[in-house]
Image: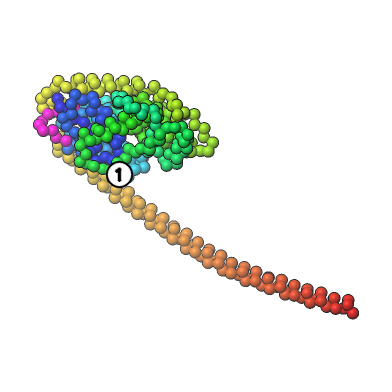
Amino acid sequence: MKFGVLFNQNNLNIGDDIQAYATARFLPRIDYFVDREHIDEFVPDTDEPVAVIMNAWYMWNKWNWPPSRHILPLMIGFHYADHQLAKQTGTPVKYEFLTGLGGEYLKAYGPVGCRDYFTMEQLQNIGIDAFFTGCVTMTLPSMPERPDKGTYVCLVDLDPKVEKKMKELLADSGLEIRVMTHNRERDINMSWEERKALVEDYLTTYQNARCVVTKRLHCSLPCLALKTPVYLIKGMDNDIRFTPYYDLLYFVRTNDFLAEDFVCDYDFRNPPANKPDYLKYREDIIRRCEEFVDSVKGLDGDYTSYVKTDYTDTAIALWRHDLMKKALDDIFIAYRDEQVKTKQLTARVRAQSSKLNKQERELAEQEEKYEGRMRELEELRAYKKEQEKKILNRLKNKLSK
């Protein structure tokens, strides 16, 4: 049996590589790298099956589903993103790629272990056997300790206002503050060894921190595994990727943390140990991954001996065609609807603008009339004072005689 690591070659978030690193450690060796965004195109050197632990976010290119028949999958840590629900740009295809032949694939290789409750519930709603496993990054091993252990706090991809407040809270702590990010420039030519070295550098930095404060899923979950105290400060408490992790972590909403009357009961200088609730998921994932590898490593023969689906290449091509056609239709419909809404909004804005311009002209005219009347009033007041002065002078002259 050959073994493959699922990764995102064109990523800009090191969290993807942390997931790949976490799954790779269960494999006796790495024979192939399987690009998540081109998972249907994977072909090994010979007609051999390749065992892959499938923990990942699926997928920007949703029509690249189902995976290659050469892949013998462990369906664990599965997450799919409805980009519209997540308020991200992307294909209008939501869960449709998990129906039809895409759903048949999951049913054949299921039950599907899911990374979050949202994915689990969505799969169950369309008739696919699914359960919650959590993410493989919760199984990461401890990293080496360094001489600077416990002397610094990591602030990872925080909201700028949160970062500022954290610096103020730690100003006189004597702890170094390390501001970090999981973002990086895309580099499709980065080798696995380079990716691995970067992941290990990040994880070692987290391992030796006094504590880590972050909004990132694949920073907070690895910190649980490393037993590094971690505090999650996040703007969206309804982010589908974080259920049920909010309950496994020390967590506060961004707005609450920034409120003037907020009293933080988390001691960043002497942080408490992480909640132990994640351990049952960690142990279960480790067991499932080890059992999977043990069950397949002695297998041989070509991939056709292990394929559990019976659809043909032609059927896949037609299904993908229909899926992509629907995606294009949805794009055109969405574009048309947006154009109609834009025209309607433009018409309303122009009508309002015309109305406001008319009101502005009327106000200007009224203002001009008002200013004219004020000038007349001032002139009358001046005339009155002048007349009063003349009358007083006449009276004075009469009295003096």
Visible residue check, residue 131: no
In the depicted view, which residue is nearer to us: 264 or 280? 264
Quick one: 264 or 26, which is closer to the camera?
A: 264
- Snapshot colouring: rainbow
Q: Is residue 274 left or right of residue 357?
A: left
SS label for mark 1? loop
Q: Is residue 138 above or below residue 378?
A: above
Q: Which residue is rendered at x = 40% and y = 34% of the image?
A: 176
Give, as a single range, the part of the protein colored magenta. Answer: 42-51
| Position of residue 69 measured from the top left corner of the image (x, y, whole percent) | 16, 32
In percent of width and height, residue 241 lies at 35, 33
Chief secondary structure of the magenta span?
loop
Image point 58% across, 69% down: which residue? 368
Hey, what amino acid is under mark 1? Gly
Q: Residue 223 appears in which quarter of the rendering?
A: top left
In reply to whether residue 47 is colored magenta, the answer given is yes
- Say above or below: 14 vs 389: above
Q: Which quadrant of the rendered structure holds the C terminus?
A: bottom right
The residue wearing badge 1 is 90
Is residue 80 rendered magenta in the image?
Answer: no
Image quadrant for the N terminus?
top left
37 or 138: nearer the eye? 138
At x 10%, y 25%, the residue is: 301
